[in-house]
Image (cartoon, rainbow, N blue to C red):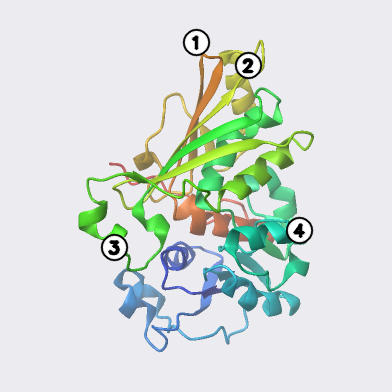
Amino acid sequence: MVKAGIINVTGYAGVELARILARHPEVEIAAATGRRAAGRKLGEVFPHLASTDLVITEDVTESVDIVFSALPHAASAERLGPMVSDGVKAVDISADFRLKDESEYKDWYAVSHPYPDLLAEAAYGLPELNRGDVARARLVANPGCYPTAAILAMAPAVSAGLVETDVIVDAKTGVSGAGRKASVEYLYSEANENMRAYSLGGHRHMPEIRQGLRRLCPSVEPRVTFVPHVAPMTRGILATCYAPLKPGVGGREVRDAYESFYADAAFTHVAARPPATKHTLGGNDCIIYPTVDPRTDRLIVVSCIDNLVKGAAGQAAQNMNLMLGLPEAEGLRQLALYP
């Protein structure tokens, strides 16, 4: 039985990870931390997890085979660095190890990286693209929710050279994407029946999207326009991505490229019609629908994920399975909660 530790179990990503690992047949949650809830049972703080009978602690004091960090950026790397050096495998759900360029990390996160020597080593945990790297890694950077939806949407087209790498990503997320914090704009009366764009001056996930597309086509520097929105729902991301097609590329070629690219993917599926966020609610799937606008010769790709599952905790568990040599889908086969 694999012993796992969760750092910061009281945030949305942490508690979702606890829900997933609690029913994983090969995993025991041996430790779960949370400063404000330390000393209380996990089931007391979150009644839906009462069956775990686990006490929340301030630090991971138990011996674990793998640790997940759901701390904010910078704090996460500070906590994980010594544990990785001691031989514990780790999945970082924060942004600390996603960007390979130390100066780019500092520019976007306004802090010097606590463990820059680990940036090159960390595998980018998008299994559909980096399954082998993840399987060999001792440290995995779990992708951001928006980059997961956007990169998976565009990967087949960019990899096959079907589009010009001038990509527009228009994405909507549920309010849980902001985390479990008190903020005026996320109060019910502010978020309900309302939608707004934000971070138009530059969102921190934009360089991560650009980095992912660059890896698929190293010879070209991709241009990415990314506009995120908050939608009046709890969970989900719907990303609509646009890129000009190269001359002569048609709908059949696009469809074939997408179906071939994801033919062996455990959780990413190419749909016959545009997906909705409720088609992925509570599950680890990414559902993708590519189509071509013949009037403008433009590729349009719609992708949907649950931001807390495939966009965070579910993908973290998927990465764990690969790192430990377990079946990739173990403990993650759950159909969406529809409607």
Q: CA distance from mark 4 to mark 3?
A: 43 Å
Q: Residue at x 53, y 49 (%)?
A: 202
- Choose mark 1 or mark 2, whichever is in front: 1
Closer to the chain start, of discs 3 and 1, is: 3
Task: Please state which amino acid type lies under the numbered disc 4.
Answer: Arg
The image quarter in which residue 336 lies = top left
Could you say whether the residue bearing mark 4 is in a helix, strand or loop? helix
The residue wearing badge 4 is: 136
Residue with the mark numbered 1:
295
Question: Circle 2 sits on which residue?
Answer: 253
Q: Which residue is mark 3?
A: 184
Residue drawn at x 60%, y 13% is: 250
Q: Which one is in front, 254 or 239?
A: 239
Marks 1 and 2, how far apart at CA: 17 Å
On-image quarter of the C terminus? top left
Q: Amino acid at mark 3?
A: Val
User: Which residue is found at the position 26% from the left and 60% from the top?
Assistant: 187
